[in-house]
Amino acid sequence: MNCAETESLPSVVIPLLKGVVYRDEKPTIWEDLLRLQGFVRDYVKVLGLELNLDESEGYAFLGSVEEEEGADRPRLVARRQLSYPVSLVLALLRKKLAEFDAEQDRRYGFYPSTKGRRGDDRGASDYQGFRRRPVAFRV
């Protein structure tokens, strides 16, 4: 690592320690993070953290390294057990999100293929995958 990389490493690690870094909000930090990704991973590993980076979605954050049961290492964020009502609300929200995603798939034309394995179009019961159908929009 040369001197220029050493000087830009804190400018990448400190925002990650503060929270999530988004590509759209901080493009210079994002470019430095991509360039110094290996050094950042090595640096935060010493602290018991790992870099979670999603280039396609454009975000990065630090999380605790998953250790075996016997290791008693302090955590960056304390784990707390959720109460039953909070767990129930989260489960219901997850269900609604899955329903919404399924509705969006149907709305924008992702339907199961009804073509059978024999090549007939009589609506076989086993689906072979998804195919895109054009969708007519009302104005």
Image (spheres, helix red, strand yellow):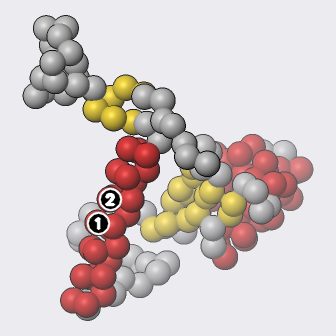
Crowd band around label 2 with a 10 angstrom C-alpha radius: few (<14), some (14–19), many (20+): few
Residue where numbered disc 1 is placed = 95
Q: Residue placed at 51% from the left, 59% from the top?
A: 50
Q: Are marks 1 and 2 in contact (CB under 8 Å)?
A: yes
Compared to residue 72, the image places residue 125 above or below, namely: above
The outermost residue toward the top is 119
Position of 23 relative to 72 (above/below): above
The three-letter amino acid code for the residue at tag 1 is Lys
Seen from the viewer's position, the closer of residues 36 and 90 is 90
Q: Residue 39: in sight, yes or no?
A: no
* 34 relative position to 116: left or right: right
Q: Is residue 35 above or below residue 81?
A: above
Q: CA distance from mark 1 to mark 2?
A: 6 Å
Q: Which element is circle 2 on? A: helix
Q: Pick out the residue farthest to the left.
A: 125
Does 76 sit left or right of 30 as displayed?
left
Query: x%, y% of residue 73?
Result: 39, 76
Percent coordinates x, y for residue 4 in the rendering? 89, 50
Q: Position of residue 80 (x, y in %)?
A: 33, 87
Q: Nearer the viewer, residue 25 or 52?
A: 25
Toward the right, the furthest residue is: 4
- Residue drawn at 45 percent across, 68 percent down: 64
Residue drawn at x 43%, y 36% as measured from the top left: 109
Depth check: 18 or 44 in front?
18
Query: Which residue position is annotated with label 2?
Result: 99
For numbered disc 1, what is the local secondary structure? Answer: helix
